[in-house]
């Protein structure tokens, strides 16, 4: 199968075919470009979609279905990233390659066509030489024939002299000789032309056809490889896309309707009891007057609260009835003095009992975390001071004293605040939500109460003071440092934190033998996880694969 043999007389059609092949290559390159644009636009649309549905403010919802939806949005964002990568690869590796291939094919095709035209011009030139030699031979032959005819006529004419006959004979001889020379020149030109023509059709032109055939086959093979590469590029992102889809499925498995219902209770439970039954007022009783006056007084006390619901035009809003009093939301469950809402208090006493205890526990958990952090910092300072004492060249041990003093002040303040909030929690746990607390009544309730503060226990103690105790100590004694630490540890079981996630990795540059409490030994080239970074004391907290944690010198490790 050779174009030079089978298509020797179809050069123009072969050149048109190669041109159309190059145009098809350019068209395929445009297709790849448009395909990349489609992938890029799709990725942008996914990015915009996730951005529109992500919460505008950073809020951590406790509900599993909301968290699952946020995880789904993250996975969709990762899918968008893979499509962006695919678009980039299509542009960089396939589109650019096909454009470059089209340019190279155009240049190569032009070179082969010019070569063919050069060979054709050479053959045409040889043909012109043959034509000239043939015309010259024809003219010489005609002259020879006329000269011989003239000589025969002269020889038969008795009226001509011998000199004239000899002259005619000499002319005929010259013409015959010249015709013989032209014949030889024509034969030589014909032989050269035939040889050139044979080389043209059997050697030179087939070489050009072969070059065009190889060029076209190379174009097709590169196009085939390009189509395959485009498929491979899309296959390369499929595992990650499938992983994202698996992540979405895993996020859906985390949705727990029972857990969400429980969290709704945790979030909105007030800890109050439903209203008691309304007492029957017997007007025939001797105390009817006093009962009536009490009812009147109750109605008079409810007037300022009802006035708060009056609209600007003087018309009152419709009072909620039935279940509306229970599910009325924060507006009906908040308690007001006159028209003003009760201000926020440090012990969260303005909240319902259940929410008050919840906020106090979160506050104590936060303080516990801060104390743990300060305690770890102090341990690091003590270790650094021990190192300086063992090797004074590394630094002055006395320079750490000021930092230790500042740390002690922070610890004392945090522990004092911890004890204060523990007192608040003990007060709330002892009084909130129990029968000893006066029930809060919703707005519009017919059951009246004479309690001045609806969050005040019957014994008259405020949430800040139980049995005359100060907020800093439930036992009435002034807490010292050791009691503060014990008070923190007393809530470890209830507010124990999960192990902190590592913030990085490191490799041990030198072996280290721990000689002080809190330090951790390590071996050369041992892989470690960083739990807490160096806070300027020269020590970094790390964790080994077996779960052991401790401090090592920062200069002894290489942080990745």
Image: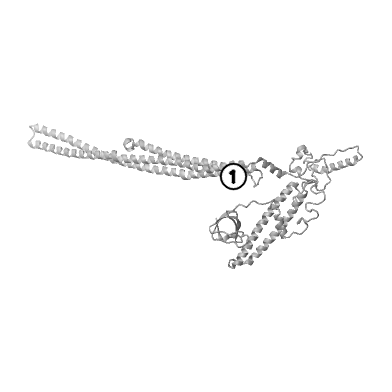
Residue 548 x %, y % = 60, 55
Q: Which residue is mark 1?
A: 74
Question: Which is more toward the observer, 255 or 399?
Answer: 255
Q: Is residue 484 above or below residue 150?
A: below
Quadrant of residue 550 within the rendered picture: bottom right
Residue 32 x %, y % = 47, 41
Residue 284 x %, y % = 91, 37
**Residue placed at 86% from the left, 41% from the top?**
295
Quadrant of residue 64 within the rendered picture: top right
**Residue placed at 80% from the left, 54% from the top?**
467
Which image quarter is the C terminus in?
bottom right
Colour convention: one colour
Does residue 118 appear left or right of residue 66 in this picture? left
**Residue placed at 75% from the left, 38% from the top?**
324
- Asked which secondary structure carries label 1, the reply is helix
Q: Is residue 373 above or below residue 198?
A: below
Which image quarter is the N terminus in?
top left
Residue 532 is at least partly visible in this image: no
Q: How many marks?
A: 1
Quadrant of residue 148 within the rendered picture: top left
- Classify mark 1: residues with Cα within 10 Å, few (<14), some (14-19) or many (20+): some
Does residue 288 appear left or right of residue 137 in this picture? right
């Amino acid at each position: 199968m050779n174009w030079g043999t089978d298509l020797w007389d179809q050069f123009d059609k072969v050149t048109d075919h190669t041109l159309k092949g190059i145009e098809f290559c350019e068209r395929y390159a445009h297709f790849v470009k448009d395909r990349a644009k489609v992938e890029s636009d799709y990725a942008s649309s996914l990015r915009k979609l996730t951005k529109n549905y992500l919460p505008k403010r950073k809020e951590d919802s406790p509900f599993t279905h909301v968290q699952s939806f946020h995880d789904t949005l993250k996975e969709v964002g990762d899918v968008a990233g893979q499509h962006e990568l695919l678009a980039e690869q299509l542009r960089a590796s396939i589109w650019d390659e096909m454009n470059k291939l089209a340019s190279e094919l155009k240049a190569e095709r032009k070179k082969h066509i010019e070569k063919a035209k050069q060979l054709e011009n050479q053959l045409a030139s040889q043909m012109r030489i043959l034509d000239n030699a043939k015309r010259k031979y024809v003219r010489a032959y005609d002259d020879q024939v006329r000269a011989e005819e003239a000589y025969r006529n002269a020889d038969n004419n008795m009226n001509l002299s011998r000199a004239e006959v000899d002259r005619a004979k000499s002319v005929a001889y010259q013409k015959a000789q010249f015709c013989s020379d032209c014949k030889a020149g024509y034969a030589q030109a014909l032989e050269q032309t035939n040889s050139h023509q044979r080389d043209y059709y059997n050697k030179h032109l087939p070489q050009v056809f072969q070059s065009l055939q190889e060029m076209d086959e190379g174009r097709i093979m590169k196009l085939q490889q390009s189509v395959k590469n485009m498929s491979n590029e899309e296959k390369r992102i499929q595992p990650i896309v499938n992983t994202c889809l698996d992540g979405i499925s895993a996020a859906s498995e985390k949705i727990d309707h029972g857990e969400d219902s429980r969290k709704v209770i945790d979030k909105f439970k007030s800890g109050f009891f439903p209203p008691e039954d309304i007492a029957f007022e017997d007007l025939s009783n001797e105390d009817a007057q006093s009962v009536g006056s009490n009812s009147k007084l109750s109605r008079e006390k409810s007037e300022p609260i009802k006035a708060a619901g009056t609209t600007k035009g003087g018309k009152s809003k419709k009072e909620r009835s039935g279940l509306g009093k229970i599910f009325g939301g924060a507006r009906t469950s908040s308690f007001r003095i006159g028209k003003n809402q009760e201000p926020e208090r440090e012990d969260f006493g303005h909240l319902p009992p259940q929410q008050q205890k919840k906020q106090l526990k979160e506050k104590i958990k936060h303080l516990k975390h801060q104390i743990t952090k300060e305690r770890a910092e102090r341990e690091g300072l003590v270790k650094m001071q021990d190192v300086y004492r063992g090797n004074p060249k590394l630094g002055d041990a006395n320079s750490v004293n000021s930092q230790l003093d500042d740390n002690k002040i922070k610890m004392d303040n945090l522990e004092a605040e911890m004890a204060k909030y523990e007192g608040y929690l003990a007060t709330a746990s002892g009084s909130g939500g129990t029968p000893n607390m006066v029930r809060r009544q919703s707005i519009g309730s017919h059951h009246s109460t004479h309690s001045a503060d609806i969050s005040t226990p019957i014994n008259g103690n405020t949430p800040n003071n139980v049995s005359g105790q100060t907020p800093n100590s439930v036992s009435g004694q002034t807490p010292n440092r050791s009691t503060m630490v014990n008070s923190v540890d007393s809530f470890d079981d209830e507010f124990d934190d999960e192990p902190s996630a590592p913030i990085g990795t490191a490799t041990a540059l030198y072996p280290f033998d721990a000689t002080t409490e809190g330090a951790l030994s390590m071996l050369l080239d041992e892989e470690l996880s960083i739990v807490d970074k160096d806070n300027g004391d020269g020590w970094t907290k790390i964790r080994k694969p077996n779960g052991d944690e401790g401090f090592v010198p920062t200069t002894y490790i290489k942080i990745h």
